[in-house]
């Protein structure tokens, strides 16, 4: 039974690491430029503080995921890893929320503030951002499942099943 728990944990951590790394790489490589009324502008993730926060949070989660992948089988740090998994899940959730709000403005604009949508002019950039956000959502969901699974595994000895 312990071997099954370890395999499931490792698979979930690999999936989370892959999703966070993918989200980071896709967002960092997102850039496009357009010319409107003889004015050339470029769209990149560095133009937005929310997208910068998203990239930093995903990179932190990627680094943590790689470290936790090697430490998850050690019982001495098991509870610390469970706590850090919760922190990383909250970090991912907050960064996705910020980036999603920014992406929504880029896609639909804001008529009250007079901001026009930009996705019609820079579709490649918007597609990259969408892909990065999808990968980030996958990572956040995997961390949620990992947190629930870890809690069940850690709390199981407290509630023994009687035959």
Image (cartoon, rainbow, N blue to C red):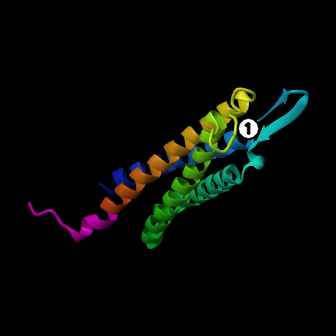
Residue 27 lies within the magenta run: no
Left or right: residue 22 compared with residue 143: right
Query: Residue drawn 63% across and 38% down?
Result: 111
Residue visible at 71% across and 54% down in the picture: 49
Task: Using the image, determine if residue 90 lies above or below residue 13.
Answer: below
Identify the image quadrant of residue 148: bottom left
Q: Nearer the viewer, residue 108 or 126?
A: 108
x, y percent for residue 27: 69, 42
Name above or below for residue 67 compared with residue 114.
below
Helix, strand or loop under label 1: loop
- Give the residue displayed 54% in from the left and 56% down from the top: 94
Seen in the picture, residue 54 relative to 129 is either above or below; the reply is below
- 149 relative position to 28: left or right: left
Q: What residue is pinned by disc 1?
A: 30
- Expressed as whole percent of the image width and height from the top left, the position of residue 84 reads 50, 66
Let me know if residue 47 appears in the view: yes
The stretch of residues the image draws in magenta is 153-163
Q: Nearer the viewer, residue 58 or 1?
A: 58
Residue 19 lies in what quarter of the image? top right
User: Residue 30 appears at what percent x and percent y?
Assistant: 73, 37
């Amino acid at each position: 039974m312990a071997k099954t728990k370890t395999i499931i944990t490792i698979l979930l951590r690999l999936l989370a690491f892959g999703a966070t790394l993918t989200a980071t790489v896709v967002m960092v490589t997102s850039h496009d430029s357009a010319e409107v009324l003889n004015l050339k502008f470029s769209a990149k993730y560095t133009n937005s503080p929310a997208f910068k926060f998203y990239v930093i949070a995903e990179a932190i989660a990627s680094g943590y995921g790689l470290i936790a992948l090697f430490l998850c089988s050690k019982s001495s740090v098991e509870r610390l890893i469970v706590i850090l998994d919760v922190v990383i899940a909250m970090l991912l959730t907050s960064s996705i929320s910020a980036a999603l709000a920014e992406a929504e403005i880029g896609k639909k604009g804001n008529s009250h503030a007079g901001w026009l949508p930009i996705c019609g002019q820079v579709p490649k950039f918007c597609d990259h951002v969408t892909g990065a956000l999808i990968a980030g959502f996958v990572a956040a969901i995997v961390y949620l499942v990992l947190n629930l699974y870890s809690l069940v595994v850690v709390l199981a000895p407290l509630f023994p099943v009687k035959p």
